[in-house]
Image (cartoon, rainbow, N blue to C red):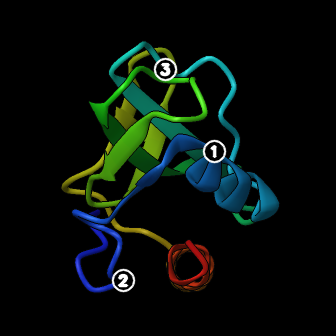
Amino acid sequence: MKFENVGLAEKECDFDTLRYACESLGLVHAGQWDYERVSFDYKYVDKVDDSVYYLRVQAYAIKGEIPKSNAVVKLLMPLLGKHYYPHGVEYEGETFPKHIVDNATKKLTQLNEKLEKALANH
């Protein structure tokens, strides 16, 4: 599922600002990066059927290299996917629980607000 209306796609900021904003909302950076791309994930476990979902915020470097603090990144459209063991995460053709979609939307709105505030202060 793509989150098209939260204002994050195409936003540009420095890597440290993105990392701080994501991590303050519980999105984990972990090992999902190389020098050009990065992902921040938030894991949901649905208590009804133990299904696992991931909210994913992705970006790519347009200046410098990730994870250097002076790298400038551009965000892609955030995604919500359902995890299938051992195959991976599916983002399309799924039905997502409303409470997870609502929480993910709220988290992405908060992320956008944090980034807007940080960008306004630069």
Q: Earlier in the sequence, mark 1 or mark 3?
A: 1
Distance (Cα) linking label 1 and label 3: 14 Å
Other residues around mark 3 within 10 Å, as few (<14) / some (14–19) / many (≥20): some
Residue at 40% across, 34% down: 89
Label disc, if present, on residue 6 of the rendered structure: 2
Give left or right: position of 83 versus 46: left
Amino acid found under the numbered disc labelled 2: Val
Q: Can residue 74 be seen?
A: yes
Question: Relative to 111, does residue 18 appear above or below in the rendering?
Answer: above
- Secondary structure beneath label 2: loop
Disc 1 target residue: 16
Question: Relative to 28, does residue 112 appear above or below in the rendering?
Answer: below
Q: Nearer the viewer, mark 1 or mark 3?
A: 1
Count how many numbered circles sit on residues in the image.
3
Q: Can residue 45 be seen?
A: no
Residue 120 x/y as whole percent? 52, 83
Distance (Cα) linking label 2 and label 3: 23 Å
- Secondary structure beneath label 1: helix
Residue at 54% across, 48% down: 54
Residue 10 x/y as whole percent? 22, 63
Q: Nearer the viewer, mark 2 or mark 1?
A: 1
Q: Quadrant of the N terminus?
A: bottom left
- Secondary structure beneath label 3: loop
